[in-house]
Amino acid sequence: MAIARSSLSRDRRRAELREFLRSRRARVSPADVGMPEGGRRRTPGLRREEVAVVSGVGVSWYTWLEQGRDITVSEEVVDAIARALLLNAAERGHLYRLAGLNPPRDVPAPAVPTSPELRRLLDSWLPRPGYVRDRHWNFTAVNDMAREVFGYGETDHNCLVSFFTNTRYRALHRHWAETAPQVAAGFRADAAHYPDDPEFDRIAGDLAAVSPEFAELWARHDVAEHTSAVKAVDHATAGTLVFDATLLPLPEHPGHHLILHNPRPGTDTQQRLEDLMRRRSLVVAHPG
């Protein structure tokens, strides 16, 4: 059984590598890497032999790599291909993992409170929004202001799914369309850290079946890793709220992240949050 799972994981990684290399090759033109166009092209992007030339590897070898064959890949070659395809840091790390290599280590993440303190931390973060998500982007803890500001309800269990299916969240998010590609790319990058975990494929497959926007973005095979973002929300009561969102890894729970939202400097978001918190408190204090 273990051998079968290992083989399945290896085959899945090779299939992902094949599609990733093809998608990256298609977006790079010969002019981007200092090569002549070479006449009419039936498909966009570089040809395999052009990638091989720019990378300094054999054409047959690169073809085998893109076909997902069982060949030996070194870090030096991966770096050369990454340069030829103009990959950014996140894409380069993704290529390393798909090739079966460990990418260069990142700077260790700072320590954060352990699980017993997380709930109190989120509550003390009020009136600012905050939540914790696991490696599959499932919510494990959400403070009240995150529910109020972002429109999360009792049926919202997964950050990715809610982004693409929660109509209230979509209406509130000022830059939803611009942010959507990064969200899908971030989930794919996270999935590459766990190539033998089928839950990522299940979540992505189920979501693609109900969200055409996600299906189209997922098919691009884009990857992106980020630890911060800017979120702008048009709240029906509080008005425009702008946040700096920071993702903090939880070392004691691998794959989990604490996401904290801070009012963006130069806006009146903090005051609006405090006013909203007071109004919510009044409603709670005087029911009916």
Image (cartoon, helix red, strand yellow):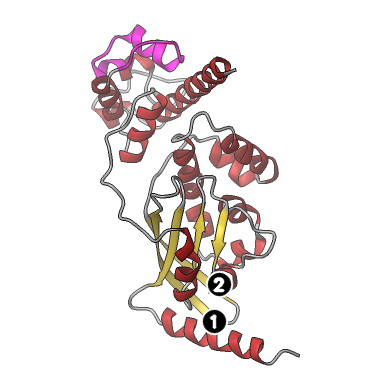
Say whether disc 2 or disc 1 marks the residue closer to the N-terminus: 2
In the rendered view, does 25 fall on the left or right side of 42? left
Name the amino acid, label 2: Val
Which residue is at the far top?
A: 60
Q: Which of 224 and 70 is in front in this view?
A: 70
In percent of the image, x 47 and y 20: which residue is there? 14
> Which residue, given by chain and number where applicable, does mark 1 sit on?
238
Highlighted range, magenta: 52-73
Mark nearer the viewer, 2 or 1:
2
Name the amino acid, label 1: Ala
What is the number of the mark on residue 149?
2
In percent of the image, x 26 and y 26: which residue is there? 79
Which part of the image, by quadrant, shows the C terminus?
Answer: bottom right
Please tell me whether residue 56 belongs to the stretch shown in magenta: yes
Q: Residue 102, position in %: x, y? A: 33, 29
| Label 1 secondary element | loop
In percent of the image, x 68 and y 63: which residue is there? 154
In percent of the image, x 39 and y 61: which residue is there? 113
Quarter of the image for residue 38 reads: top left
User: How many neighbours does mark 1 have within 10 angstroms: few (below 14), some (14-19), or many (20 or more)?
Assistant: some
Quarter of the image for residue 54 reads: top left
In the rendered view, does 7 fall on the left or right side of 79? right
Which part of the image, by quadrant, shows the N terminus?
Answer: top right
In the displayed structure, would residue 141 be above or below residue 91?
A: below
Q: Residue 281, position in %: x, y? A: 59, 87
- Do labels 2 and 1 touch, CB within 8 Å? yes
Which residue is at the far right?
A: 288
Please tell me whether residue 35 belongs to the stretch shown in magenta: no
